[in-house]
Amino acid sequence: MTKKYTIEITETLCRQIEIEADTEDEAVELATEMYEAADIVLGAEDFVGFHTEVVAVE
């Protein structure tokens, strides 16, 4: 009998950037703010992999 599968596909995007800051925490905070403000937008060129997983079967 045929079953219905729900498959989750997760892509991973990654980019390294340089931030000038006085502390590591400040650098992370600045990078986070830049990302949330869409000053940093990851795209296809930042693709590093994907994962598939069955999340439900009916």
Image: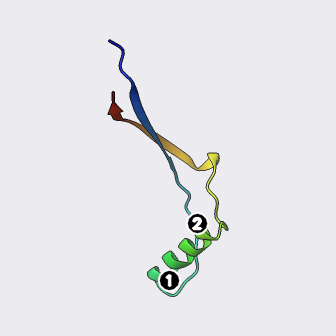
**Which residue is found at the position 49% from the left and 75% from the top?**
28
Query: Label 1 amino acid?
Result: Glu
The one of 47 and 11 positioned closer to us in this rendering: 11
Q: Are marks 2 and 1 in contact (CB under 8 Å)?
A: no
Secondary element under disc 1, as helix, strand or loop, is: helix
**Which residue is found at the position 51% from the left and 78% from the top?**
29
Secondary element under disc 2, as helix, strand or loop, is: loop
**Mark with earlier residue (2, 1):** 2
Rendered image: mark on residue 17: 2
Rendered image: mark on residue 38: none
Nearest to viewer (mark 2 / mark 1): 1
What residue is pinned by disc 1? 26
In this rendering, the count of numbered labels is 2
Q: Quadrant of residue 42?
A: bottom right
Query: Label 2 amino acid?
Result: Ile
Q: Using the image, determine if residue 21 lies above or below residue 47.
A: below
Q: Position of residue 32 (x, y in %)?
A: 54, 72
Q: Using the image, determine if residue 50 lies above or below residue 31.
A: above
Q: Position of residue 3 (x, y in %)?
A: 35, 20
Q: Position of residue 47 (x, y in %)?
A: 56, 46
